Each structure stands twice: as C-alpha cells, then as structure tokens.
Amino acid sequence: MNFKSLILAAAVALSFQTASAADIKLVDGIAAVADGAVITHKDVRKAMATAKASLPKNAQVDDAELRSQVLSQLINRTLMIEAGKRRNISVGNAEIDAALQQLAAERKTNIDGLYAAAAKDGLSRAALRREIADGIIMQRVQQQAVMQNARVSEAEIDAMIARASEQGIALPEGAPIRQYRAQHILLKGESANALAAAESGIRKLYDQARSGADFAMLARQFSQDGSAAAGGDLGWFTDGQMVPEFEHAVHTLKAGQVSRPVKTQFGWHIIKLTDVRDAGTPEERRRNAVRQFIAEKKTEQATIELLKQLHEGAFIDIRGVR
C-alpha cells in the first residue's frame, strides 16, 4: 500500500515549532538543521504519531521508512517557512486569531479549548500562535509558487480535449459545477502602513455588516474594488477563479453569512455569500473536469520545482536517529 499521500498530509499539516540551536533543550536532541532552523527528535516523534494515527486500521508501515518520509516533510516545511521569512512575509495577530477560530470550529471547540489542548502537549499560548503563524507563512510560499505557475488557460483545455479526441480517449463527463455568488468589500494596502490602515478599516466594516448594516451600501461607499458600483457583487464564479484565501473563506460560509476579514495579495476583504448552486451544461462540466485535472498536475509540478529550488540553496544537516 502507498502511504505517501497520507504521510504527506499528516506531516505537512502538523504544527511544530522551529527554533535556533540555542533554543533547543539537550534532552530534545537535534534530528536535523535546515536553513538554520532546528528540527528536534521530539518533532519527528510527534509527526510520526500523527502520521500513524491517520493510517487505516491494521495498516502495516515500516518505522524507519515512516521516519524518513516524515523527516523529509518536516525539512520541506521548514525550508518553506524560512523562505517566507526571507521574503518578509509576515502574519498579524488578527490573521492568527482568524486561523485559530477556524481551527476551533473544525475541531468543535473554542480558542480556549485549543490553548488547553496545546498546554497538555507542553505548548504555551505564545508557542501555539507562533506555530499557527509559521503555518500561514508556509501556505503563502506555496500559494505564490502555484499562482505563478498553475493557471490553466482555455487554450490548454482545448489542446487536451483535441488530443483526447485524436487518441480515442473518453473524457470524464464531469460532475455538476459548484458555483458561488458573493459580494465583497476590498480595502487595498500597497504599503505596510496602508495595509495596517486597511486592516483597521475592514474590521470596522465587518462589525457594521455583522450588526445588520446593508452590505451592498457599505460596498458602494467604501470598497476599493471595481465591483463597488454593483454593491460588491462578483456574479457567479467557480473554484479556481479566485485567489486561494478568498475561496477558502467562501467555502466556510453559508448563504447570507459574512466572513471574518480575509487578507489576500490585493488587500483586506470581507465577503458575503449570497447563493450557491450546482450548474453547467455537459460541455461546461467536461471542460471543468479537464481544467481541474490540468490544474492539479501543474500544482504538483509547481510544488516540486519550489522544493527543488529551496533545497538547492539551503544548508541541510541530518543527524543520526535517536
């Protein structure tokens, strides 16, 4: 059985704290050093336990192979986080709070519950928040690579459909296309000061929208996006058309709900989901299935290229097993 995808998901999703060698207690032991950040044997054991817990019951996996794969993923994660810090990717307290709120909702608890669970694992509130921030930095580094290299053009879809026709390959019919209709308010931030002002402004607008103010009126008055004149209405769109942070926020909403403030490359948004539908003609569904297939392949390749570049320029020292 191939466990790579399961191990990858478990290890990459794992929050762990990178630190300098001076911060590591002797009892922890150093498993690897990557770009100056330390991965301890404790980190590896914790990641292995997470990976094992995700495997099917009665699944057999070699501990040495599992350790090697988990350590490799922890090194990859560390390299991406360190690359993000070199690129001055920063994460504010509001973003950390939003991520904690989302995680708490997924685990059917609250933020205090997350802090309590972390404390049982010997993790302070400050350490948990640092780990959340590191996870966001890693996601942004991945997103930058994917967004630069994984867009799918209509010409690429046409070419794949034509090749399949020439070779007599039947294309999938494609599932109904999930479409979303939403309004949003965008406050841009083209400098650090402007971004901070945008964050403050969008939070005030969020409070007004949550208190019952007319969203379309707020958008017409304050939004800095071209959709402002239409009350922030973006029309119908499908997955893959918006930036990842925006899409993720939309996926967490029910019709009529307004998202917490969301930061993207364009600035700060609040989003109101107005409707959801499954639609598409047979031809649209087929093209959407082909688009998703190409996008997945390009995303995989973009991630491979990113990691290759990071490894080529990094100092990596893997220590012995303990």
Image (tube, rainbow, N blue to C red):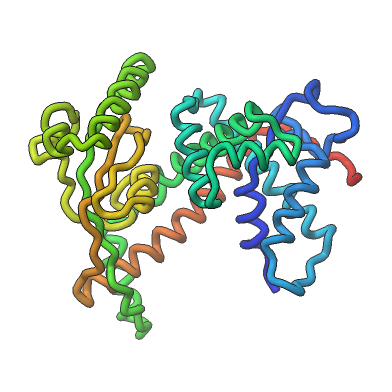
Q: Residue at x 73, y 49 (%)?
A: 47
Q: Position of residue 26 (x, y in %)?
A: 89, 29
Which one is nearer the viewer's eye here, 290 or 255? Answer: 255
Say above or below: 107 vs 148: below
Q: Position of residue 87 (x, y in %)?
A: 51, 26
Q: Residue at x 44, y 28 (%)?
A: 94
**Number of marks:** 0
Coordinates of residue 114 in the picture (x, y in percent): 60, 41
Residue 303 or residue 255, whichever sits in front: 255
Q: Is residue 55 left or right of residue 162?
A: right
Location of the N terminus by quadrant is bottom right
Task: Tell me which residue sits at (36%, 53%) in the image.
Answer: 251
Relative placement, left or right, of 260 versus 82 is: left
Using the rendered view, name the quadrant where residue 228 is placed. Answer: top left
Q: Is residue 280 visible?
A: yes
Give whichever of 169, 123 is nearer the camera.
123
Say above or below: 231 vs 194. Answer: below
Place of residue 24 in the rendered image (x, y in percent of width and height, measured from the top left): 81, 27
To which quarter of the image does residue 62 belong? bottom right
Q: Is residue 89 visible?
A: no
Q: Height in image: 67 above or below 86?
A: below
Q: Residue at x 72, y 28 (%)?
A: 19
Taking depth in this image into account, of 286 and 310 the one nearest to the observer is: 286
> Is 228 on the left or on the right of 148, as rendered?
left
Q: Is residue 244 above or below residue 29?
A: below
Q: Quadrant of the C terminus?
A: top right
Residue with the most extreme left position: 229
The residue lying furthest to the top in this view is 193
